Image (cartoon, rainbow, N blue to C red):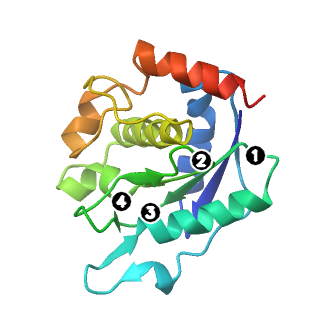
Amino acid sequence: MRVGILPIGHVDAAVLTGLAEKLPRVFPNTKCIVLDEYVSLGAEYFDKKRRQYRSNAILTAIQSFAAKHTSLHRVLGVVDADLFVLELNFVFGEACCPGNAALISLWRLKPEFYGEAPDIELFSARTLKEAAHELGHTLGLRHCPSPSCVMYFSNSIRDTDRKQSLFCDQCYLHVTITSSQLE
């Protein structure tokens, strides 16, 4: 599987590079590349009342990007902004399930958001978990009932911290079969 990592607005290049290096550990036979292109984080995505960005609108832009870049099996958008969907106060990410586009937000993954000291290792682990989770959705996986599986729904950052960056056996089998069909 070939995954393009697409910055949405300004995103720290080290975060993108770290994801590209670590995601193949979670997904078998995967090559990740940080794309030279980016999608602007325009005002059309911003909800002034909520003071957050609409994840579904950004995801639509990622889908359009993916449709033009058919050499990639999946496109993972990464944004450093607070996201929401109508039903929820916030989201860590969103994906087409199944589909070729996913999005994660770094905003609430930073320890500083919760009044804690910066912690690069914790931030990196959270970022990997959310990226793997959203890419799992693109492969057709739904939320898993196992709290340690990366596909477990994170209602809070504590849920993200509790789960692993890996799939449980059942979810891993699905990922292995589905991603091998892309090659």
Residue on which the image places disc 4: 107
Task: Report how far apart the C-alphas of labels 2 and 3 lie in the structure.
Answer: 23 Å
Q: Residues within 10 Å of mark 3 (few under 14, many from 20)?
A: some
Depth order, front residue of 155/67: 67
Task: Report how far apart the C-alphas of labels 2 and 1 lie in the structure.
Answer: 12 Å
Q: Which comes before the other along the chain, label 2 or label 3?
A: 3
Q: Quadrant of the N terminus?
A: top right
Check disc 4 and give the amino acid type.
Answer: Trp
- Relative horizontal placement of residue 35, taking residue 120 as reference (left or right): right
Relative to 177, say whether 79 is above or below.
below
Check disc 3 and give the amino acid type.
Answer: Asp
Instruction: Report if the CB atoms under discs 1 and 4 are less than 8 Å apart.
Output: no
Relative to 103, say whether 155 is above or below.
above
Please report the residue visible at 74 percent of the width from the left and 31 percent of the height from the top.
182
> Residue 123 at x, y = what percent?
37, 43
Check disc 2 and give the amino acid type.
Answer: Gly
Q: Which comes before the other along the chain, label 4 or label 2?
A: 2
Please report the residue visible at 63 percent of the width from the left and 61 percent of the height from the top.
63
Q: Quadrant of residue 12?
A: bottom right
Q: Which comes before the other along the chain, label 3 or label 1?
A: 1
Task: Report how far apart the C-alphas of labels 1 and 4 lie in the structure.
Answer: 26 Å
Residue on which the image places disc 1: 72
Q: Which comes before the other along the chain, label 1 or label 4?
A: 1
* SS for callout 3: loop
Residue on which the image places disc 2: 99
Instruction: Report if the CB atoms under discs 2 and 1 are less than 8 Å apart.
Output: no
Task: Report how far apart the C-alphas of labels 4 and 3 lie in the structure.
Answer: 5 Å
Instruction: Report if the CB atoms under discs 4 and 3 are less than 8 Å apart.
Output: yes
- Relative horizontal placement of residue 6, taking residue 138 as reference (left or right): right
